[in-house]
Image (cartoon, rainbow, N blue to C red):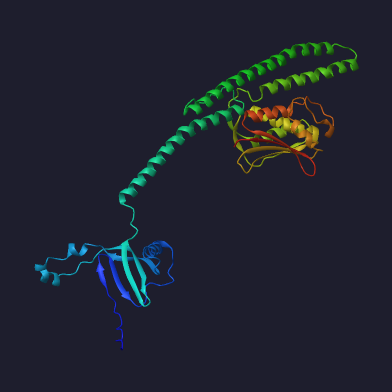
Amino acid sequence: MRQRPRAPRTPIQCAIFSIRYSVTAEPETLRNASPGGAAGRMARGVSQALGGAETHATGRLVEAPLRGWRRRLDPPPHQEESRIHAPRAERPTQQVTEVNLSVRLGEHSWLNARARMPGPRPAPVGVLIGGVISLLLVGVGAALVARQIGRPLAQLADAAQALGAGQTDVVAPVSGPADVQRASSAFNAMAARLGRQMSRQRQMLWALSHDLRTPITALRLRAELVEDDQLRQRLIAPLEEMERMTEQALALARAGASEEDRTNVDLAEIARTLCGELEDLGLPIQANAPEAVLTTIRPSEIARAMRNLAENAAKYGGGGVMAVYRNEAGEAVVEVRDDGPGVPPDMLSRLTEPFFRADPSRHEANGAGLGLAIAQAIADGHGGRLVLENRAPKGFSAKLVLPG
């Protein structure tokens, strides 16, 4: 019996909600579709439910009109005429996910389905506003906490810097969290103890220096009565050295603790005046201070420190140059340079020790060895520093660096 030829299959389509079906001889979905994403998960789920049937799926984002919009816009049937003549309202759209699925039914039969699912929705306005408000509240709270902690710590740091600069009446405000308050209280107790100790040491040194003047003066008067010139000179020479040591020890005790008021002065003018006086005394020190360098200092103390540096350069370096300028950090610098033999590197750190002299690297010169110690104390009392270093290929440099 002859079989009737099989008529070609026509697509059968139906629409149920947002899903459309069709049966075709070839799959409408690409066979090399990516197995990942929502479409891939749907294909694997359908294949497992149908006992491993060959399944392919693809997905994409498309724009589709909002559901239910037509029912809200279209007029009732009895207003059909007015609907025909009325302009058609533009429908709003939304972004949805369209998934195309193809399942093998037979050798030449595929079931195709197209489903539209809700696409990614933007976050509700309430959620966004809530997030912004939360961020603002957290930021304000963090700023308040940082301010509550940061201000007492900054005040404590300023007090520590003032104590390091030689001030003895330093008190840090006790405020902020409990830990910061304990740290401020401990600092105040330490500062008070250091202040009392430094005051006792200075008072003792002042008293000793003052009390030594009377017997030294009495011995000098008696030595002047000696008729033998050689014997008189041998007696007066050590007395003069004792006087110099006493005066320098008293100056060291006063360094950084002077009651002189701080004023805004020109270091260049002090350098030019000082170098002129030293040249009149026969000390070869020249000033290199063409521009004004203003800073707030105690003028008498700084002039004493500058004089000590200049005298050291004249005695141990054969003369030098006093330069005044500002460095890259904006600090005021007084630098005394000489072309002498310099100092052995292992002795540089000991130059500011009281009564220390690096005589092995320099020719003999009179002095008690307190000049650099006094300059160091004065620099510390002004919140500055004294920098001592050798120059290349020879020479020595002493820099008095002061806050700008």
Q: Let me know if residue 262 appears in the view.
A: no
Q: Residue at x 84, y 19 (%)?
A: 237
Q: Farthest residue to the front: give it.
A: 1
Residue 2 pos. (x, y %): 31, 89
Residue 131 at x, y = what percent?
36, 46
Closest to the observer: 394 or 65? 65
Classify 339 as above or below 19.
Answer: above
On the question of residue 208 being in view, the answer is yes
Of residues 8 and 112, the one drawn nearer to the viewer in this rendering: 8
Placement of the C terminus among the 4 image quadrants: top right
Extreme residue toward the left, this view? 78
Disc count in the image? Answer: 0
Who is closer to the viewer here, 129 or 114? 114
Residue 130: image location, x then y, percent: 34, 46
Left/right placement of residue 380 relative to residue 139 reads right
Give me the residue at 29% from left, 77% from top.
Answer: 11
Figure quadrant of residue 80: bottom left
Toward the bottom, the furthest residue is: 2
- Of 338 and 342, nearer the camera is 342
Figure quadrant of residue 77: bottom left
244 shown above or below 382: above
Rendered residue at 37%/64% (across/down):
46
Screen quadrant of the N terminus: bottom left
Lateral position of residue 142 relative to residue 330, left or right:
left
